[in-house]
Image (cartoon, rainbow, N blue to C red):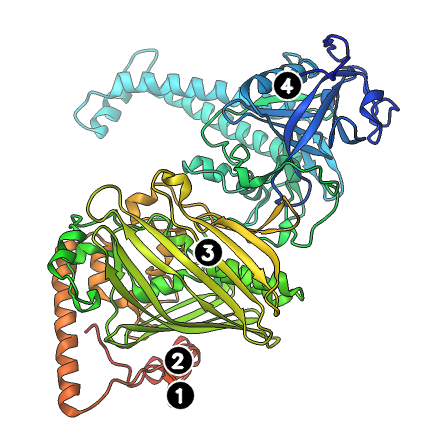
């Protein structure tokens, strides 16, 4: 790249004429013309983000003509595909990432250079065609009327602003004089009396009168400024306000909080929703402009993995794909809200306290209990994180509403099984920063619910067996239900601890399709020395019970010499009912999963949300995990059953950083549980789960109590004021 086509003359430097607008329909630059017909100034190979939604980058041949027209083609011997007039475009570059983004308003080229020399060469040549902005020109503001963008004149606003600043300075001077005359007295009253007792010409009374007059002028000027602004720019209010919407889409909110921008959309693709008017700050539409982004927060578009790049001469750049970007799960804001009884609940974005308790060596504990089942060992509270095993089960459903909702709608069986597989993989994303701390082991009969109307998710879990500890779960959303049970066994291998999942998980879609999911093992690595980390290794299988079609996803083990880059990879294969390979998937369980569309191109199916800033200080929790133990309005002791994990006092103490109280309370609760179990054994009574049951001869746990109890119906009764009736005979295991 950066080199002229063979046989052409030396590169020419042609600054553009700002006063002359070059038509993109000019025969010399019309897309579809061959490269030989263009008057080339500079050309070469680059990586260009494909037009197909979320399709990553592909190698393209970029051409800059003498008229300042930037075009691209599949290769030098192919016709040009599209063009942008640089003199009338916005060019944004980041040397740190080697990226250049050219935005004409109607088309955007997202480009990544192959090396630093190419980046400098392309940026310099593009810069030569950007007209210099005059010193007195300022960015204009455009107000959207819904059908058009209207430029507004803000000169009067700045006049009023200057006048206000002048009045503020005068007020400040008078206040300073008053301070010199009054301050220094013993009290404020003495200061005022002393000031007004002055007989000099420049008495405080004179200054006070002047100050009062200035204040009136300032109030009047403020009204003028307010009227000037509101007459030019419509006021937008409410949580769906335009500027909030724009900031969230551009990732500004992420930058302000110190995290990566959550949005990956280009500025040209910004749209406002649920508002009658919108405000856009932009440059003059008839002149180009340049922006340089070399800050730490502009990394999303620059971070291009090898998996995202295709080197083929794909001819379908301009076609739409089946899995549209608009149907992908969005990266959520930390302040997800839920409407419940017309109230808006703002979810917390951090825990009450940072990581608490001294980290004890897990290896030393394991060494003392070699051969024992760890579920029978009472660990100190410092080994825990402030979530229960039931709440950890709910974490696996963070992305279920989007992925399974889409799976329920599609009629393409390949897309459907891939979406179900993406849901299964997404359940591991929350563990990306988890290492040596484990969830609290629930008490027998302990429950947890997660009702999120904003996410179309209802979830409930119950600990149904004490030894081995078995958790039964049920979740449902639009077009799907998912039930199962889980039990984790463990093996200590010396330097690592293997966690072996047992149980079953069955997903049923409302059209009758049903899938069973089997999970791989997990390993806690470097228990003896080094940085501890969690790794999932083995096969995850998704099987369609009705057709026999299946998806096998391999969680690959990191290599000894590969370091961090070799970890967390997954690769999947879709098989039809006859066992023939249909397509493949690839990605990382920490970040994303993509389905293969053709020989070299993969299309994103799922992408993980951004982690909170300083997540390591808060147990590696995601925003969703932080909300699970929160006592939110409308979801407290007045409606929750007395068995809900959020009411567990030792876990609450630990979340608040009260380690000693948490340890003492944990020991008390465990001893009370042992006493209840001894009493039941003496009476020959077996614990009966409340909200789940087993059919005769079946080891699987099904949603619904043995007498037909339905948790969500009881929860509704409690919400309507019948708490005693709803939770009748539910034991108060934390009291």
Disc 3 versus disc 4: nearer the observer: 3
Distance in Å between CA atoms under marks 4 and 1: 69 Å
Callout 2 secondary element: loop
- Residue where numbered disc 2 is placed: 700
Left or right: residue 188 versus residue 562 is left
Callout 3 secondary element: strand
Callout 1 secondary element: loop
Work out whether mark 2 precedes mark 3 in sequence or the reverse, and give the earlier one.
Answer: 3
- Residue where numbered disc 4 is placed: 122
Which is nearer the eye, 43 or 91? 43
- Residue where numbered disc 3 is placed: 554
Contact between marks 4 and 1 (CB within 8 A): the answer is no
Q: Position of residue 487 (x, y in %)?
A: 32, 70
- Residue where numbered disc 1 is placed: 695
Q: Position of residue 490 (x, y in %)?
A: 26, 63
The crowd level at tag 4 (other Cα within 10 Å; few <14, some 14-19, many 20+) is: many
Distance in Å between CA atoms under marks 1 and 3: 33 Å
Work out whether mark 4 precedes mark 1 in sequence or the reverse, and give the earlier one.
Answer: 4
Distance in Å between CA atoms under marks 2 and 1: 8 Å
Left or right: residue 211 versus residue 69 is left
Q: Position of residue 621 (x, y in %)?
A: 35, 51
Work out whether mark 2 precedes mark 4 in sequence or the reverse, and give the earlier one.
Answer: 4
Which is nearer the eye, 141 or 103? 103
Which is nearer the eye, 373 or 723? 373
Against 348, residue 148 (above or below) is above
Contact between marks 2 and 1 (CB within 8 A): the answer is yes
Against 115, residue 646 (above or below) is below
Residue 497 picture quarter: bottom left
Q: Quadrant of the C terminus?
A: bottom left
Work out whether mark 1 precedes mark 3 in sequence or the reverse, and give the earlier one.
Answer: 3
User: What residue is drawn where x is 40% and y is 58%?
Assistant: 538
Distance in Å between CA atoms under marks 2 and 4: 63 Å
């Amino acid at each position: 790249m950066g080199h002229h086509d063979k046989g052409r003359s030396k590169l020419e430097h042609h600054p553009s004429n700002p006063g002359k607008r070059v038509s993109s329909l000019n025969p010399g630059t019309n897309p579809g013309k061959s490269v030989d017909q263009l008057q080339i100034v500079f050309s070469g190979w680059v990586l260009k983000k494909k037009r197909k939604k979320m399709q990553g980058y592909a190698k393209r041949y970029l051409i800059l003509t003498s008229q300042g027209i930037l075009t691209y083609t599949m290769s030098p011997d192919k016709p040009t595909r599209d063009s942008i007039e640089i003199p009338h475009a916005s060019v944004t570059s980041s040397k740190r990432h080697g990226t250049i983004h050219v935005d004409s308003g109607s088309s955007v080229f997202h480009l990544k250079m192959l090396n630093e020399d190419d980046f400098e060469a392309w940026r310099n040549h593009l810069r030569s065609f950007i007209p210099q902005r005059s010193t007195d020109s300022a960015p204009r503001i455009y107000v959207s009327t819904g059908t058009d963008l209207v430029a507004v004149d803000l000169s009067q606003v700045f006049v009023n602003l200057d006048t206000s600043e002048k009045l503020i300075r005068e007020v400040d001077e008078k206040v300073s004089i008053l301070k010199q005359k009054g301050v220094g007295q013993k009290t404020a009253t003495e200061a005022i009396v002393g000031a007004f007792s002055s007989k000099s010409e420049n008495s405080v009374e004179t200054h006070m009168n002047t100050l009062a007059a200035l204040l009136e002028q300032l109030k009047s000027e403020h009204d003028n400024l307010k009227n000037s602004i509101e007459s030019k720019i419509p006021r937008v209010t409410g949580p769906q306000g335009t500027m909030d919407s724009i900031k969230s889409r551009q990732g500004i909110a992420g930058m302000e909080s110190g995290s990566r921008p959550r949005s990956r959309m280009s500025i040209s693709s910004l749209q406002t929703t649920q508002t009658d008017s919108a405000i856009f700050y932009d440059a003059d539409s008839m002149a180009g402009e340049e922006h340089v982004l070399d800050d730490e927060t502009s990394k999303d578009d620059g971070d291009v993995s090898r998996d995202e790049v295709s080197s083929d001469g794909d001819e379908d750049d301009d076609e739409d794909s089946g899995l549209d970007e608009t149907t992908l799960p969005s990266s959520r804001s930390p302040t997800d809200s839920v409407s419940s009884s017309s109230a808006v609940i703002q979810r917390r974005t951090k825990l009450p306290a940072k990581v608490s308790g001294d980290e004890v060596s897990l290896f030393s504990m394991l060494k003392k209990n070699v051969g024992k089942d760890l579920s029978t060992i009472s660990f100190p509270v410092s080994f825990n994180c402030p979530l229960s095993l039931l709440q950890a089960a709910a974490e696996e459903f963070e992305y279920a509403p989007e992925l399974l909702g889409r799976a329920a709608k599609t009629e393409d069986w390949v897309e459907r099984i891939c979406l179900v597989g993406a849901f299964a993989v997404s359940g591991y994303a929350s563990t990306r920063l988890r290492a040596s701390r484990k969830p609290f082991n629930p008490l027998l009969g302990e429950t947890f619910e997660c009702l999120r109307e904003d996410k179309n998710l209802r979830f409930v879990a119950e600990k149904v067996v004490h030894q081995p500890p078995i958790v039964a779960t049920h979740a449902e959303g639009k077009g799907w239900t998912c039930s199962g049970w889980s039990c984790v066994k463990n093996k200590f291998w010396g330097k690592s601890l293997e966690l072996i999942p047992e149980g079953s998980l069955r997903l049923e879609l409302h059209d009758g399709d049903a899938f069973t999911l089997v999970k791989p093992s997990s390993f806690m690595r470097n228990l003896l020395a080094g940085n501890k980390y969690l790794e999932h290794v083995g096969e995850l299988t998704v099987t369609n019970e009705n057709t026999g079609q299946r998806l096998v996803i391999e969680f690959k083990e990191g290599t000894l010499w590969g370091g961090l880059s070799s970890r967390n990879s997954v690769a999947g294969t879709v098989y039809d009912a006859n066992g023939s390979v249909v397509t493949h998937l690839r990605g990382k369980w920490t970040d994303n999963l993509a389905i293969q569309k053709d020989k070299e191109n993969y299309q994103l199916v799922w992408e993980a949300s951004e982690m909170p800033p300083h997540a390591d200080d808060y147990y590696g929790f995601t925003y969703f995990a932080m909300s699970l133990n929160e006592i939110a309005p409308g979801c407290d002791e007045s409606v929750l059953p007395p068995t809900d994990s959020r009411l567990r006092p030792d876990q609450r103490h630990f979340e608040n950083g009260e380690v000693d109280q948490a340890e003492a309370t944990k020991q008390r609760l465990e001893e009370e549980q042992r006493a209840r179990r001894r009493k039941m054994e003496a009476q020959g009574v077996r614990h009966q789960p409340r909200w789940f049951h087993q059919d005769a001869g079946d080891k699987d746990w099904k949603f619904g109590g043995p007498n037909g109890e339905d948790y969500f119906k009881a929860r509704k009764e409690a919400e309507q004021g019948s708490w005693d009736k709803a939770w009748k005979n539910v034991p108060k295991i934390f009291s």
